Amino acid sequence: MRDIIFALSVRSIRLHFLRSVLAALGIVIGVVAIASMGMMGANMTLSVTEELSAMGNILVVRASGEMHGGGVPGMGGLGGGGDDEDLITDDQFKDIQRIAGKYGTVYAVYSESDTIEYGDSERRTTVYGLDPDLIPSIVTLSDGSYPKSTSSVIIGPTLAERLDLKIGSKIDIGDPDEGPTTTVRVVGIIEERGMSMDLNTDSAIIGNEKLFIGMYGGEGEYEQVNIALDDINDAETVKTDIEDQLNRKEEEVSVLDSSRMLESITSTLGTLTSFVMAIAGISLIVAAVSIFNVMMMSVTERIREIGILRSIGTQKLEVRKMFIYEAAILGLIGAVIGAIFSVAIGYIVVLAMVGTTEYFFSPGSLVYVPFAMLVGVIICLVSGVYPAWRASNLDPIDALRAE
Amino acid sequence: MCSSTVVELEDVTKVYPLRSGDVVALNGVSLSIDQGEFVAIMGPSGSGKSTLLNQVGSLDVPTSGNLYIAGKNIGKMDDRDLTRMRLNTIGYIFQKFNLIPLLTAFENVEYPYILKNRKRDESGRVWNILEVMGIDSDLALHRPSELSGGQQQRVAIARALINDPKILLCDEPTGNLDSKTGRHIMEILARLNGEGMTVIMVTHDPAIAAYARRTINLVDGKVN
C-alpha cells in the first residue's frame, strides 16, 4: 500500500476479476504454446544430437556422382543395388587406407538392399558385408557372438524385434522369385545405435564380406569407405588430404564429415523450432489483442476517475504507471500460471513427439519456460502502452464531466 | 500586486475554438482575491463561472492575459507544474464529491498526502482532519459508495485540506445535497474561512452565496 498507484491497479483488477482472468487466460495459452513448442524443439535437437554425436568421429567416403539426396546420407544404402551405381574401387580404397590409416580405423563397406524371409514374414533390409576381423571393432553386440563363418550373420535390434528373430534363427536372404536365396544363421544381435551416417545397423544384417560377394558378386567394389578417427580434430585434415589426392584429376570421391552433418541437422531443427514457435506466437498476438481490449475498457470506464485523479494533483506519468501496472499484473499472473501449465503440457508434448523425456529437465529445454514467460509479460506491457498513454493524456476537465 | 493577494487575474480571456465558431468563455476578466477572503462567484449558466474556476484551479490556462496564483503565472506553466500546483496549493471541492471509488474514505484523504510526501501518513494527520470533519474511524474505512452525500462531501473537504492548500475552490459544493446538509457543509466552509483559509466558491444559489463576504457576478464572460 506504500505505492498508492500500484494499489489502485490491483484494486481495479480485483473489481473486474472475471474480465481480468479471461484476459490473463489468453496469456496463459500463449505462454504454454510457446514454451511447449520450444521445449519440443529443444528436446528433439538434444536427442538427435546425442544420437549423432556418438558417431561424430566418422568420415564417410563415397564415389562421386552418386546422388544421396542431400539430407541424410546414411540412408543411401537403402537406395543402392543398381548396376550403374558408382562404387569405390579397391585401388581407391587402398589409397584412402594409405592416407587415413594413421588417423584411425579404415574399413570398406559392401552394401545392398534385399528381401529377407523368416517363416512367413518378408521384409526389405540392408545387407552389409564387412571384413570379419574388423566387425568387433565397428559394432557392439547386445547378445550372442560375432560371425566367424560365411553362413552366420548378426542383425540389428529393430529387425530382430519386427521379425521376432533370436540367436540361432535361420533366415533366407534374397527374393525367391528372382533367383536363388541364401540361408544364414543369426549368431548375434547388435546393440541399438539409432540413426547414423556410417552404418544404419538397427534394422540391417551384417555378415562376412565373403558371404556378401558370394551372394552379389562385385568384389573390390565398395558402397562406401568409413574412417573411424581416433581424434575428431583430424577430420578436416583427413578430408582435405583424401580430396586432394583422389580428386586430383577429376572428382572421384566425396568425403562426408559427420560433424558437418550434425551442424546442418541441428541448424535445420533450430529453424524448424523457431518456425513452430512463431506459429505458437500467434496465440500470444491474440492474447495481446484481448489484453489491449480489456485495458481500453478499463480506461473508458474510468475516465471520470482519471479526471478526479488528475484534478487533485496526479501527474500524467502516475496515471500512465497505473495502467501499465495493471497490464503488467495481468501479464505476470498469466505468465506464472502459463509456466506451471507449460511444464506439464510440455512434458506430454515432448513424450508424444520426441518419444523420450530424457532431456526434458535439462537447462536447454527448460529455458523455454522463462523465455515464454518473458515474452508473455512483454506482450502485455506493449498492449498496455497505448491505453495508458490515452488515459494520461485525457483533458482533466473533459474527463471530470464524463458520466 | 499586494503581498496578501493569492489570486490575481489581469485581462484574462479564454476562447474555446469550435467548428461552429469560437466560443468566448471569459472576456477580459480582471480581479484579485486576497488571502483569507471568502468569495462567491455567481452568474447564470454559460456566464463563464466554471471556466473561471477551472483557470484558478490550474486545470486549464488562459488563452491570453495573466493569471497569478500564489504569485506564480500559471499561463507559463507546463502540465507537470500545473499538476503540482493542484496538488500543493489548491484544494478542490466538487458538486459531485468526486471521491475515488476504489479507495476507502481514509485512503481518499490520504491519497494526495502520499502523492506529495511519497510515503503513508504516520503522523495521524489524516485521522485528525477526518475527525474535525465529523467522520469517525468506523466510517473512514468504508468506500465512498457506502457513505451518504453529506459524509462524502465532508471526506472530500478533508481530502482538499490534507496538503495545507492556500486556496479552497468549491464548485457548487451543496448542489447535490439537501438543504440541511448543505447548510452544515457551508458552516464548515465558513469556519475554515474564519481560521484564515481563502475560499472561492461558484454557485447560482443566493442563499449559499450569502455565506461569502464578497460576491463576484459574471455575465457573458465579464465581471458585472
Image (tube, coloured by chain):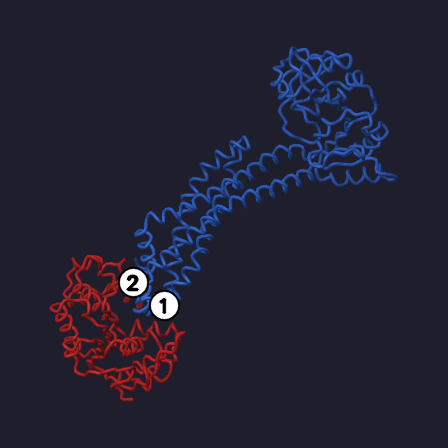
Tell whether A112 sits left or right of A89.
Answer: left
Q: Is the Cβ of the residue at disc 2 closer than 8 Å to that at disc 1?
A: no
In the rendered image, the vertical position of residue B50 relative to residue A287, given as above or below: below
Q: Nearer the viewer, residue B217 or A246?
A: B217
* Quadrant position of the N terminus of chain A in the picture: bottom left
Residue B195 image point, x, y percent: 16, 77
Q: Colour of chain A?
A: blue
Q: Colour of chain B?
A: red
Question: On what subunit does the disc labeled 2 rest?
Answer: A
Q: Nearer the viewer, residue A240 or A164?
A: A164
Residue A262 image point, x, y percent: 66, 38
For label 1, the crowd category at 10 Å Cα-Cα, with few meaning under 14, some 14 to 19 and many 20 or more, is: many
Can residue B218 be seen from the camera position used here? yes
Sooner in the amino-acid sequence: mark 2 or mark 1:
1
In the rendered image, the vertical position of residue A12 relative to residue B113, given as above or below: above
* Quadrant position of the C terminus of chain A in the picture: bottom left
Tell me, for residue A56, which label it has, or none: none
Residue placed under numbered mark 2 in the picture: A403
In the rendered image, the vertical position of residue B1 relative to residue A247, given as above or below: below
Residue A334 image point, x, y percent: 41, 47
Tell whether A397 sits left or right of A243.
Answer: left
Residue placed under numbered mark 1 in the picture: A315
Tell whether A270 sits left or right of A321.
Answer: right
Find numbered disc 1 in the image and state the secondary structure of the residue it sits on: loop
Q: Amino acid at mark 2?
A: Glu
Question: What is the number of callouts on the image?
Answer: 2
Find numbered disc 2 in the image and state the secondary structure of the residue it sits on: loop
Q: Residue reaching furthest bottom?
A: B1
C-alpha gap between disc 2 and disc 1? 22 Å
